[in-house]
Image (spheres, helix red, strand yellow):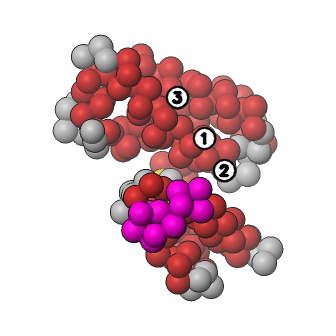
């Protein structure tokens, strides 16, 4: 089932549909938040707030709306609300509401996406291909593993290492 079909089922009362949506997207949401907040406990708090808001606003979801776009509007707004509530913006690595509003391509500000494209050439061809499958095509690790003829844990590990290397390159630590 697509995310949109699962969300429709969840709106109609299917709690299993929510569980599946949560399992599919919890790592992305948490990764996005952890990448913007210095504190893991704060990232966990905002993560919980975002999914509570998703639950509370499920009836406002409009059929046909891309689920990921809708979810990340909720996540982004939860993050902005958290920062405003804390009133300590200097505590965060790179957060201001305008930058968060510019989230694109797997939840990175456009400036960082441009830097990432420049640094991508330093990754192996396999890493580039797998990152593209994961983030440009939205494939699951199972789908990536199948197309690359490797195990799912290995696909996850290669993508994770590619992301770590890309982050290191972008921050000048490699």
Q: What element carries label 2?
A: helix
The circle drawn on residue 50 is: 3
The answer to which of marks 3 and 2 sits earlier in the sequence is 2
Q: How would you rate the neighbour count of disc 1 (Cα within 10 Å): few for under 14, some for 14-19, many for 20 or more?
A: some
Q: Position of residue 173 (x, y in %)?
A: 80, 74
Could you tell me which residue is drawn at 77 percent across and 39 percent down?
Answer: 39
- Identify the element where label 3 is drawn: helix
- Decide which of tag 1 and tag 2 comes sooner along the chain: 1
Q: Name the residue under label 2.
A: 35
Cα separation between marks 1 and 2: 8 Å
Residue 143, quarter of the rendered image: bottom left
The residue lying at 68 percent from left, 36 percent from top is 43
Visible residue check, residue 113: yes
Nearest to the observer: residue 155 or residue 100? 155
| Distance from the alpha carbon under mark 3 to that under mark 1 | 10 Å
Q: Is residue 4 magenta?
A: no
The residue pinned by badge 1 equals 30
The x and y percentages for residue 88 are 75, 36
Residue 60 visible in the displayed image: no
Labels 1 & 2 near each other (Cβ < 8 A): no
Q: Which of 133 and 112 is in front in this view?
A: 133
**Relative height, residue 16 to residue 1 (above, below):** above
Magenta stretch mostly in which secondary structure? Answer: helix
Question: Residue 150 magenta-drawn?
Answer: yes
């Amino acid at each position: 089932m697509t995310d949109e079909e699962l969300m429709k089922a969840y709106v109609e009362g299917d709690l299993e549909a929510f569980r599946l949506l949560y399992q599919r997207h919890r790592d992305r949401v948490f990764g996005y938040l952890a990448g913007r907040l210095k504190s893991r406990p704060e990232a966990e708090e905002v993560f919980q707030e975002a999914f509570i808001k998703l639950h509370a606003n499920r009836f406002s979801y409009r059929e046909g709306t891309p689920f990921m776009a809708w979810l990340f509007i909720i996540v982004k707004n939860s993050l902005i609300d958290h920062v405003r509530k804390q009133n300590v913006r200097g505590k965060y690595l790179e957060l201001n509401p305008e930058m968060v509003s510019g989230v694109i391509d797997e939840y990175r500000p456009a400036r960082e996406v441009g830097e990432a494209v420049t640094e991508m050439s330093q990754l192996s061809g396999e890493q580039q291909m797998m990152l593209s499958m994961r983030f440009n095509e939205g494939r699951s690790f199972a789908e990536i593993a199948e197309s690359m003829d490797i195990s799912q844990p290995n696909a996850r590990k290669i993508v994770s290492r590619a992301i770590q290397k890309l982050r290191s390159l972008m921050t000048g630590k490699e």
